[in-house]
Image (spheres, rainbow, N blue to C red):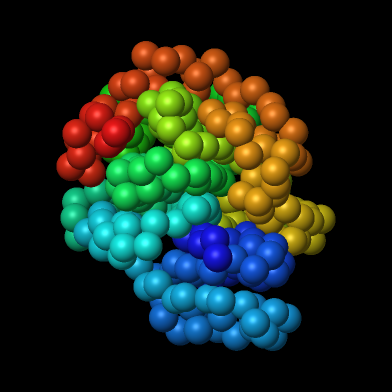
Amino acid sequence: MKRAVITGATSGIGAEIARLLLAANGMTVDLVGRSQGRLEQARQRILGTHPAADLRLVRADLSLLSEVRALADQAADNPPDVVISCAAVIAEIRDVTSEGLQRTLVTNHLAPYLLMRSLVKPIGDRAARFIVVGASPTALARTPVNLDDLDCHTGRGLGPLPSARPFAAYGRTKNMNAMFVYALADRLADSQIKVNGVHPGIISGTGLARDARGSLRVFSSLVAPFMPGVDAGADSPAWLATSPEVAGVTGKFFVKRKQVPTAPHTTDKARCDRLWDESARLVGLSVSAGR
């Protein structure tokens, strides 16, 4: 039986992928979340509609690299066929973890970088699919990653409204997701591991704006009633994880099951390589992809 690991699986798109698609397709699904209580609740919701679903609960705080490493070690014991990175936060710029890293940067970018890179060697020559849930390529085209300020410590280029700066920093990490997809796919071009990115759409019920303040909170509350639900957002990521149509596709970015381009600043090889190298330094890996 094939096995999938889904981060951010206690709510929102991650939980919906497991509940509606992967679990229904007969896969063993590892639900990864930071709250044991919410993991239990997610399992009960899934079993309510798919009583035979084979689920494992894995508690891990993806804002801490030590817990990401432990997650990777656990997953390596029985290497997965699918890894889907859904976990994401919008944290204050000054929100630094106990490991000294900015929480948004770690959760949204460094965690999938470390997890997926750590699983390359255990997976070996087997076929596998890595999917990174990103954000709108169109919306993010004007927010390039500042490679000299990955954690947005200086605040340069984040806009004049303090309440909106966490969202701008989040946007940069979502551009990092696309850059990581291209860089990892390039390094694994001779392997059976396929790496793709996907924008699930502007979706309500993700919980991303729960800690928003000021203008961002007002905006989120106004548009939420008009946005589609998490079932729509789960469609493209789960399709990438399971469809034979994309079994051989790698290094691409998708919106509504269609391949789309992302901004030139996310595809520039020199920029992608620099982000790769700096990310490796931050997580304590070599620059080699592990093969």
* The quarter of the displayed image where residue 225 is located: bottom right
Image height check: is 290 above or below 2? Answer: above
Q: Disc count in the image?
A: 0
Name the one closer to the observer, 236 or 98. Answer: 236
**x and y percentages locating residue 116 in the rendered image:** 38, 46
Q: Which residue is at a point 70% across and 29% down the rendered structure image?
A: 259
Residue located at (23% from left, 29% from top) = 287
Q: Is residue 244 above or below residue 66?
A: above
Question: Relative to residue 80, is residue 226 drawn left or right?
Answer: right
The image position of residue 106, as x and y in percent, is 34, 49
Q: For the point 46% across and 30% down, which residue is it?
A: 185
Residue furthest right as drawn: 226
Quadrant in which the N terminus is drawn = bottom right
Residue at 22% x, 59% y is: 66
- Horizontal arrangement in the rendering, residue 42 relative to residue 72 (left or right): right
Do we see residue 198 in this rendering? yes
Q: Nearer the viewer, residue 16 or 94?
A: 16
Q: Is residue 212 visible?
A: no
Find residue 31 and report its horizontal and vertical position in percent. 49, 69
User: Residue 232: horizontal and vertical position, in percent?
Assistant: 76, 55
Q: Answer left or right for 107 relative to 73.
A: right
Position of the C terminus by quadrant: top left
Residue 137 quadrant: top right
